Image (cartoon, coloured by chain):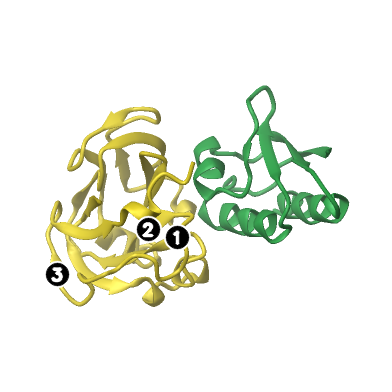
Chain colours: A green, B yellow
Amino acid sequence: MIERTVTVQHREGLHARPAALFVQTAKASGLPVAIAREGEEAVDATSILSVMQIGIRQGDTVTISVEGNGAEDALDALVQQLEQS
Amino acid sequence: MTQVLAPVSGQVHPLSVVADEIFSSEMVGSGVCLRPGPDPQTAVAPVDGELVQIHPHAFVVSNRGRGVLVHLGVDTVKLLGEGFEKLAAKGDQVTQGQPLIRWNPAGVETQGYPSDVIVCVLDTPPGSIATKSVGTAVNTGDLLFELPDSLEARR
């Protein structure tokens, strides 16, 4: 498993649109992907419900973890989305 | 089979009419769009369950592992809560029909955003909700659609 920690840049946080796009990217990888806000338990990043429930805000530090073949590429794509504002 | 009630009153349309492809493509989940009248109204819980998220302009109620999203207006996150009043808090157990957000559709339109209300079941494939109510007008609390058992409890 590989993971990376990033600071979320979206001005309004991970609201419906960025959350849906993030989950779509996670699902498209076909790999198990998890996301955790600093100090909190990791949740399934392929579930819009789970990602919306965390309610990630601008400036939050989150850790994304991916497992399996191609995890590096998947992680790059996911990190890139969270670093966009 | 879980009944999902109309969180607001309005004309029922397919999600494809919504001016945001995230919702119109049902990427967020399958469901319907409600076009409310201009008068101020109160959005209610469409199902029993835990209020797993509430913003001034949107909320999610989780019922047996399925999240029902109610999003009041399109792009209304940009209004930063202006014109919306939350009546409950994240983590509350809510019952069907319980008032959750007071808002003003005409006010949203005046600020330049569509007042379309998106009601969708998170993480369900496009077209998976049978939307017999499309083309009708509903009052708050009327049956909007049914959530088949096959779509319940992903976990």
**At 25% across and 62% down in the image, what residue appears?**
B106
Helix, strand or loop for disc 1: strand
Q: Where residue B152 appears, x then y in whole percent?
A: 38, 48
Callout count:
3
Q: Which residue is mark 2?
A: B120
Chain letter for mark 2: B
Badge 2, how many Cα within 10 Å: few under 14, some, many 20+? many
Q: Where residue B92 appears, x then y in whole percent?
A: 33, 28
As measured in the structure, the alpha-carbon distance from the residue carrying label 3 to the one carrying label 1 is 22 Å
Badge 3, how many Cα within 10 Å: few under 14, some, many 20+? some
Picture quadrant where residue B93 is located? top left
Helix, strand or loop for disc 2: strand
User: Mark 1: which amino acid?
Assistant: Gly
Q: Which residue is mark 1?
A: B29
**At 53% across and 49% down in the image, what residue appears?**
A48
As measured in the structure, the alpha-carbon distance from the residue carrying label 2 to the one carrying label 3 is 17 Å
Q: Where residue A30 appears, x then y in whole percent?
A: 71, 57
In the displayed structure, would residue B41 be above or below residue A54?
below
Label 1 vs 2, first from the N-terminus: 1
Q: Where residue B10 appears, x then y in whole percent?
A: 19, 65
Q: Nearer the viewer, residue B152 or A19?
A: B152
Camera sees residue A27: yes
Does the residue at mark 2 contact the one at mark 3 (Cβ under 8 Å)? no
Q: Which residue is mark 3?
A: B137
Label 3 vs 1, first from the N-terminus: 1
As measured in the structure, the alpha-carbon distance from the residue carrying label 1 to the one carrying label 2 is 5 Å
Does the residue at mark 1 contact the one at mark 2 (Cβ under 8 Å)? yes
User: Mark 2: which amino acid?
Assistant: Cys
Left or right relative to B50: residue A8: right
In the displayed structure, would residue B17 be above or below residue B73?
below
Chain letter for mark 3: B
